Amino acid sequence: MPNGFHGTGAEWDRIESPLHRLDDTLARFADERGLQLRKNTRNWPDRRLEWNDAMNRSIQIRLVDDKIPPTYAVGIYAWQDRAVGRYIKGVTLVESAPIDVLEKNLGDVLKDAASRLDGWTPDDLEYVGPVP
């Protein structure tokens, strides 16, 4: 996980502004499903769709390479804190893609991601250690 962004404002704009092209689709998907849309968590270019039921679930789109053009990954994660510690499961659906590719396929990627996450149960999660 990146430890925040440490560059200039111009560098931030170059790597974060492409994500704006996804915002309308993400907002619609979040509204349709009652999900929370978060942006640029931990001072890093990303978008997250999050919801909680028996566990926390998240679809994450994040910067993975800031070369020109920047590329982004899509991953799904579920986690649950229990008395004995934190349990997690995560899968990367898109390793690295330019924003054009993500924008073109975003609707299908989001549907697949949500379907997979909704199919996970607390029994699918693996112990990773004490709750931080």
Image (spheres, rainbow, N blue to C red):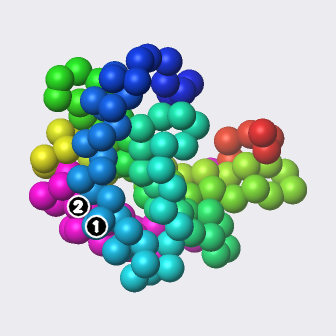
The residue nearer to you, when weighing 35 against 78, is 35
Q: Residue at x 48, y 43 (%)?
A: 40
Residue 107 visible in the shown view = yes
Q: Note whether 104 is above or below 98 in the view shown.
A: below
Please identify the dominant SS of the magenta region: helix
Q: Amino acid at mark 2?
A: Leu
The residue nearer to you, when weighing 107 against 127, is 107
Residue 112 visible in the shown view = no
Based on the picture, tell me whether residue 105 belongs to the magenta stretch. yes
Q: Note whether 97 is above or below 76 in the view shown.
A: above
The residue nearer to you, when weighing 62 against 81, is 62
Q: Is residue 93 found left or right of 4 in the rendered image?
A: left
Which label was assigned to residue 55?
none
- Dot 1 falls on a residue whose secondary structure is helix
The residue nearer to you, when weighing 71 against 117, is 71
Give the magenta range.
102-126
Q: Residue at x 62, y 70 (%)?
A: 52
Q: Amino acid at mark 1?
A: Thr
Q: CA distance from mark 2 to mark 1?
A: 8 Å
- Dot 2 falls on a residue whose secondary structure is helix
Is tag 2's residue or tag 1's residue first in the polypeptide sequence? 1
Quick one: quadrant of the C terminus? top right
Q: Quadrant of residue 45?
A: top left
Question: Is label 2 in contact with label 1 (beta carbons under 8 Å)?
Answer: yes
Q: Residue at x 24, y 34 (%)?
A: 71
Residue 120, horizontal then vertical, whole percent: 51, 69
Q: Which residue is mark 2?
A: 106
Q: Which residue is mark 1?
A: 25
